[in-house]
């Protein structure tokens, strides 16, 4: 079957009757097996069907495409055969009317000529075409020939020039075809013309032909074209013609003549190109619309100003805007190009085409942004930017607020584009959009503007933070990338500046202040005020960081000019924030930055605009800073006016670098008025920079320069304004090194200047180094020390209150100002006397600060011995204050004074002997307490601490004397009774909790000292026993310290067998009669004892160290009390199984966890009462065995003492079984006898816990 198919194919391709005579060399060696000789005989043969000829041509074309080299070799074997074959093909082309065969002939001829690359072949074909056209009586059959010529020129562009030069006569035939009444012929002519005019040389040679003959004929043909083929070819020819300025001028001149003729209503003659293109634009064919738009663009490119009016008068823009609703990207892109060029003509705007078309532009932009064609995005945004920029201010572009909002949202979407080029165009358009006349349609869409600016800044920030890979980019590409970032940032900042300018312009228009359509009760976010605050916030959080990052890579004067103008305008936009904003800018080194810009770019007359912006920015910022000074007095209006004039004239003249400015300050030569004003400006700039921690000038050099400046003033007899001298004295104090000192002449000059000032507050700036400066030189301290310290305390904001009640091991770091003052107090006691003097002479607030500072100083400097000096002053001050306040001691500085007194006493770790002054103080404080009510917590707390210290940190004889004095103060005892009764009403923690702790501890101390010393009791106090037991048996989240204090009181009562002469434990009024068996335990009952034991166990489980010591001590006293009255009950209580669970609960997982004093004391208690069910003999032996192996030297004295007591208790009970363990432990304990505990210095017994003075031994022992 395959063989038969192959034979059939060959039979078709070969002319069988003559093929046997043909040389095999004319046979194509590959499939299809085509014989060129057979083709030469078959194609002109009249008897062969057209279908077969068409098939042969088709096969030859395929062979030419697939095997170009073989076919070319086959045809080129004989030049005569080649020419003959071309003539046969051309003859077939001219004689056949079948369009498909014609197209095949043209295609084969073009491919064959192209592949052969023989000039003779080309000339042969051109000559044949020329002869054919010349011999035609009519142009009806010319389309095939003309099309062949056109495609030949298209394939071989150089033929256009030869065709015009060597076959110029063809032009007449083309003109003849153009007037032939057949649009197919006309289309072929236009096609060939288009190919000829595509060659610049041919176009130049044909320019006369076009001017004289072709131009009107062509325009007329294009105007009357009906078929799409002719229309397309006409537009194609027009596109070629419009590449040349000469032809554009010819055509547009003809069009102008045509329009003139039409305006005078003459007979139609010339044809107007704008009107022709308008007709194509109005067609429904997209291809024609695109071609028309391209032609309009091609005309306008040559000279928009010259040619645009013709299209505008023809209302072309109106129809271009209409077609922006098309779905064709190509058409929209073409229209964008047209409109961009038309926008260069003012007539485009004055005839209000933009007002008509802006909605279409915005909608088109919104639609195009949903597509992926970035070129379309860029062109649309470019058009929008051109319209927004060039639109006259007097013609409002957006006639409604809604349309303005749509434009804003479209720009917002475009700005957020991930394609940088699109975003860049969008930013430029947004910048043009932020114009007052574009936003004046009420209500102003502030929220939309804010969203647009946020998108711009966000996109710019994202781009600026993209890391640059300098290694892969190379230095040149890296510079280009930085430059590209700078341009994008500049565009963004220009948009932001326009927004700021918009806010400034709207400040004078009431209708733009807020949205008039907002309900009165609604939250008004869409207002100018809200928008203005957003601008400030956005600049602070985005603009400034972006510019600072860019400055690390490059500095562009234009960018910095825009940036500083933004900062300057923000002072106007948000006036209520300008001072705060200025402070932040100064603290961020903007004074240094601006001065560096002026020094780098503004020397001489260069960059005058940048110099003006820098000077204006500095001027406003300096005035803002001086109007709201940091820790110094505000300037009067008169002083501000003088400083304003000084800065206004001096700042533009400053363009030197910092070292040069410092050298200029130190000049000792005679300084003229203008130069002196400039010195004042420099000093104020340095002063404001230093105040905000921007120390960009060498302190050592500035220190020397300031001395020269002050001496120069003295030499010339000048007195600088107070604000300038304030700056000088502040800078000289800040720049003075610890090891350097001023010359006497400079100190003398400073003193003279100060003496000429009415009050130091005029030149005082709060800083610890300025205080140090005045206290360092005796000449200044003796004259101004008191006033300077008073000013320092007046301005000092560092609070010592948060430093109170912090354990010494965890003291927070002091502020620098306080640390400096403390250092001065340590080195100069005379300053301490000035401070104490301030307590008398200063206002209450200042005196309070002084006392707080002294209290903190004494806490942190325990090695400084000032007790004797201070206590004498304390007594005087306390007496003075008591006389001043009389019967109502609350308020004023009294609480602080008492706190300081308490602190002075608590600093003494060793036992003290109370002298007469101390006894007087004790008496005064006790009297003071008697005058207070329980609500005077701030007075009573430090007073109770002082009294408590007097009873525990003094010698035994002093303690007895102190107790006698305090017991004689009946008002104090009555106050304590009231305080103790408040315990039952206070729930949980309260402001009085600490005071209640002190009251219970103080009462327990009073009772103990009275009982042991049999002291006289002038007033007894009563405590409800039932409430006391209830508070301990059923604790309700009371603070641990308060529970420990109550336990200490109960323990004292148990140790005294409830027989105290001072304290009476009374039952509640509703208490039932006790059972007969309870009389033996009176005043306690059996149930109360058992409940109290359970309460103590519950408190022990909390594992608070202080509370645990109090619980164990109270449990010891309770069991001793019960055992003395009912041994069976005591043994029963001690042997409860719950005690074993309690013991194991207190033990944690750590090694030797039982070696804690409270646990050892608890086990000692169980051993004493033979509670083997709680602690078996084997467990006792195990405890001793582990203790014998432990390193007892690491234990505290308290734990060692508890271990020794446990060992002795076990020994007394006869429970020592393991003699080797016993001997080892005994040897260890003897080696670490109590006399050897001196190796470990005892810890401070009295501690301040939560503001309460607590003796650890008082709680524990």
Image (spheres, rainbow, N blue to C red):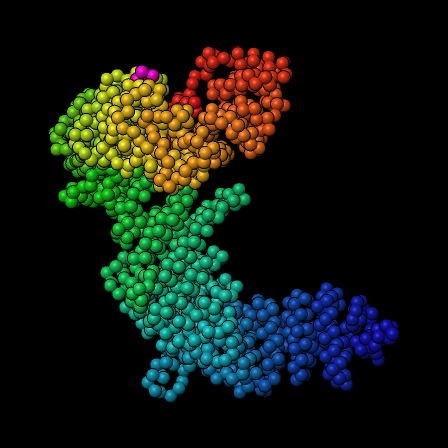
Is the residue 350 above or below the residue 259 in the image?
above
Which residue lies at the image location 37% right of the left edge and 80% below the top edge?
Answer: 259
| Residue 87 % position (x, y) | 69, 76
Which residue lies at the image location 31% right of the left edge and 56% below the top edge?
Answer: 532
Residue 958 in magenta stretch: yes
Q: Is residue 1140 left or right of residue 934?
A: right
The part of the image, by quadrant, that contains residue 274 is: bottom left
Q: Nearer the viewer, residue 1115 or 587?
A: 1115
| Residue 28 % position (x, y) | 79, 69
Residue 702 visible in the displayed image:
no
| Residue 100 % position (x, y) | 67, 80
Q: Nearer the viewer, residue 634 or 246?
A: 634
Q: Nearer the viewer, residue 750 or 645?
A: 750
| Residue 352 % position (x, y) | 33, 73
Principal secondary structure, stretch drawn in magenta: helix
Is the residue 605 above or below the residue 1168 in the image?
below
Which residue lies at the image location 73% right of the left edge and 73% below the top edge?
Answer: 60
Q: Is residue 672 left or right of residue 1004?
A: left
Q: Nearer the viewer, residue 216 or 630?
A: 630
**Number of numbered labels in the structure image:** 0
The part of the image, by quadrant, that contains residue 380 is: bottom left
Residue 758 in magenta stretch: no
Which residue lies at the image location 17% right of the left edge and 32% below the top edge?
Answer: 886
Tell me the magenta residue range. 954-959
Residue most extreme to the front: 1076
Placement of the C terminus among the 4 image quadrants: top left
Placement of the N terminus among the 4 image quadrants: bottom right
Residue 381 visible in the displayed image:
yes
Q: Is residue 827 left or right of residue 882?
A: right
């Amino acid at each position: 079957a395959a063989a038969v198919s192959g034979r059939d194919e060959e039979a078709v391709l070969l002319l069988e009757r003559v093929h046997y005579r043909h040389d095999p060399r004319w046979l194509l060696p590959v499939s299809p097996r085509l014989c060129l000789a057979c083709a030469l005989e078959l194609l002109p043969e009249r008897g062969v069907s057209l279908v077969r000829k068409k098939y042969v041509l088709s096969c030859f074309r395929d062979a030419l495409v697939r095997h170009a080299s073989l076919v070319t070799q086959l045809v080129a074997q004989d030049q005569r055969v080649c020419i003959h074959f071309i003539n046969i093909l051309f003859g077939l082309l001219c004689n056949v009317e079948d369009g498909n065969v014609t197209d095949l002939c043209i295609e084969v001829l073009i491919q064959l000529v192209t592949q052969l690359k023989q000039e003779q072949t080309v000339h042969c074909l051109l000559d044949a075409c020329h002869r054919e056209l010349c011999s035609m009586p009519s142009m009806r059959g010319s389309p095939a020939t003309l099309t062949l010529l056109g495609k030949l020129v298209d394939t071989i562009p150089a033929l256009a020039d030869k065709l015009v030069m060597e076959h110029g006569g063809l032009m007449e035939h083309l003109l003849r075809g153009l007037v032939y009444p057949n649009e197919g012929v006309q289309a072929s002519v236009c096609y060939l013309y288009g190919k000829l005019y595509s060659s610049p040389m041919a176009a130049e040679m044909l320019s006369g032909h076009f001017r004289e003959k072709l131009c009107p004929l062509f325009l007329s043909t294009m105007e009357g074209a009906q078929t799409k083929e002719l229309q397309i070819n006409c537009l194609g020819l027009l596109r070629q013609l419009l590449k040349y300025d000469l032809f554009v001028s010819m055509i547009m001149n003809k069009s102008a003549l045509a329009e003139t003729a039409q305006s005078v209503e003459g007979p139609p003659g010339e044809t107007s190109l704008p009107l022709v293109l308008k007709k194509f634009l109005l067609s429904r064919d997209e291809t024609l619309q695109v071609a028309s738009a391209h032609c309009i663009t091609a005309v306008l490119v040559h000279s928009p100003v010259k040619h645009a009016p013709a299209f505008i008068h023809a209302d072309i823009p109106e129809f271009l805007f209409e077609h922006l609703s098309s779905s064709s990207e190509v058409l929209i892109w073409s229209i964008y190009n047209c409109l961009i060029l038309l926008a260069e003509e003012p007539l485009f705007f004055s005839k209000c085409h933009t007002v008509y078309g802006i909605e279409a532009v915005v909608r088109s932009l919104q639609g195009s942004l949903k597509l992926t064609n970035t070129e379309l995005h860029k062109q649309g945004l470019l058009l929008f930017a051109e319209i927004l920029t060039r639109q006259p201010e007097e013609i409002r572009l957006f006639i409604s607020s809604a349309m303005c909002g749509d434009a804003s949202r479209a720009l917002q979407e475009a700005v957020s584009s991930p394609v940088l080029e699109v975003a860049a165009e969008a930013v430029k358009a947004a910048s043009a959009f932020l114009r007052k006349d574009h936003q004046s349609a009420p209500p102003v869409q502030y929220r939309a503007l804010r969203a647009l600016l946020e998108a711009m800044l966000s996109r710019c920030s994202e781009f600026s933070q993209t890391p640059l890979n300098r290694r892969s980019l190379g230095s040149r590409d890296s510079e280009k990338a930085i430059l590209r970032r700078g341009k994008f940032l500049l565009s963004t900042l220009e948009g932001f500046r326009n927004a700021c300018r918009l806010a400034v312009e709207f400040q004078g228009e009431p209708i733009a202040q807020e949205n008039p359509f907002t309900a009165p009760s609604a939250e008004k976010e869409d207002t100018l005020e809200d928008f203005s605050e957003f601008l400030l916030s956005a600049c602070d959080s985005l603009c400034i960081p972006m510019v600072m990052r860019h400055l690390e890579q490059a500095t562009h004067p234009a960018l910095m000019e825009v940036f500083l103008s933004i900062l300057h305008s923000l002072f106007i936009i948000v006036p209520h924030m300008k001072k705060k904003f200025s402070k932040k800018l100064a603290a961020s080194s903007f004074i240094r930055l601006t001065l560096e810009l002026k020094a780098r770019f503004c020397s001489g007359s260069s960059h005058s605009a940048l110099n003006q912006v820098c000077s204006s920015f500095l001027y406003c910022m300096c005035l803002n800073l001086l109007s709201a000074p940091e820790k110094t007095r505000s300037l009067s209006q008169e002083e501000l006016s003088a400083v304003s004039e000084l800065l206004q004239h001096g700042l533009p003249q400053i363009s030197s670098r910092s070292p040069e400015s410092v050298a200029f300050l130190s000049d000792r030569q005679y300084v003229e008025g203008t130069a002196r004003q400039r010195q004042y400006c420099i000093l104020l700039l340095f002063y404001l920079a230093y105040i905000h921690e921007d120390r960009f000038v060498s302190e050592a050099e500035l220190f020397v320069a300031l001395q020269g400046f002050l001496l120069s003033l003295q030499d010339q007899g000048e007195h600088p304004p107070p604000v300038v001298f304030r700056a000088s004295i502040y800078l000289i104090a800040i720049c003075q090194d610890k090891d350097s000192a001023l010359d006497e002449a400079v100190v003398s000059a400073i003193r003279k200047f100060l003496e000429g000032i009415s009050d130091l507050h005029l030149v005082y700036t709060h800083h610890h180094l300025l205080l140090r400066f005045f206290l360092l030189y005796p000449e200044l301290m003796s004259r101004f020390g008191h006033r300077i310290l008073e000013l320092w305390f007046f301005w000092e904001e560092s609070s010592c209150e948060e430093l109170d009640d912090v354990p010494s091991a965890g003291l927070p770091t002091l502020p620098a100002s306080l640390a400096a003052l403390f250092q001065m107090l340590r080195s100069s006691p005379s300053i301490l006397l000035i401070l104490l003097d301030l307590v008398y002479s200063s206002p209450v607030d200042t005196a309070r600060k002084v006392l707080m500072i002294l209290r903190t100083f004494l806490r942190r400097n325990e090695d400084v011995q000032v007790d004797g000096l201070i206590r004498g002053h304390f007594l005087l001050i306390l007496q003075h204050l008591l006389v001043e306040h009389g019967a109502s001691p609350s308020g004023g500085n009294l609480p602080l004074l008492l706190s300081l007194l308490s602190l002075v006493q608590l600093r003494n770790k060793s036992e003290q002997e109370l002298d007469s002054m101390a006894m007087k103080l004790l008496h005064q404080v006790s009297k003071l307490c008697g005058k207070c009510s329980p609500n005077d917590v701030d007075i009573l707390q430090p007073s109770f601490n002082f009294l408590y210290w007097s009873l525990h940190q003094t010698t035994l004889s002093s303690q007895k004397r102190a107790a006698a004095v305090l017991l004689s103060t009946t008002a104090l005892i009555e106050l304590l009774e009231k305080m103790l009764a408040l315990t039952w009403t206070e729930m949980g923690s309260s402001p009085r909790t600490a005071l209640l702790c002190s009251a219970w501890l103080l009462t327990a101390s009073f009772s103990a000292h009275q009982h042991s010393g049999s002291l006289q009791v002038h007033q007894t106090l009563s405590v409800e026993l039932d409430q006391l037991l209830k508070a301990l048996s059923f604790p309700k989240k009371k603070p641990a310290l308060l529970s420990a204090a109550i336990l200490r009181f109960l323990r004292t009562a148990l140790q005294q067998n409830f027989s105290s002469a001072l304290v009476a434990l009374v039952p509640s009024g509703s208490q039932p009669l006790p059972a007969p068996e309870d009389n033996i335990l009176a005043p306690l009952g059996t149930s109360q004892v058992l409940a109290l034991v359970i309460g103590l166990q519950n408190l022990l489980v909390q594992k608070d160290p202080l509370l645990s010591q109090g619980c164990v001590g109270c449990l010891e006293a309770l069991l001793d009390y019960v055992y003395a009255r009912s041994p069976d009950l005591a043994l029963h209580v001690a042997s409860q199984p719950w005690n074993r669970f309690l013991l194991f609960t207190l033990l944690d997982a750590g090694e030797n966890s039982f070696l804690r004093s409270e646990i050892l004391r608890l086990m000692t208690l169980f051993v004493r009462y033979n509670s083997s069910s709680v602690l078996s003999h084997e467990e006792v032996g195990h405890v001793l065995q582990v203790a014998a192996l432990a390193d007892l030297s690491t234990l505290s004295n308290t734990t060692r003492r508890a271990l020794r007591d446990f060992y002795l208790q076990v020994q007394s009970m006869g429970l020592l079984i393991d003699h080797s363990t016993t001997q080892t432990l005994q040897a260890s304990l003897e080696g670490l006898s109590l006399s050897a505990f001196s190796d470990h210095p005892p810890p401070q017994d009295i501690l301040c816990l939560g503001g309460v003075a607590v003796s650890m031994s008082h709680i524990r022992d």
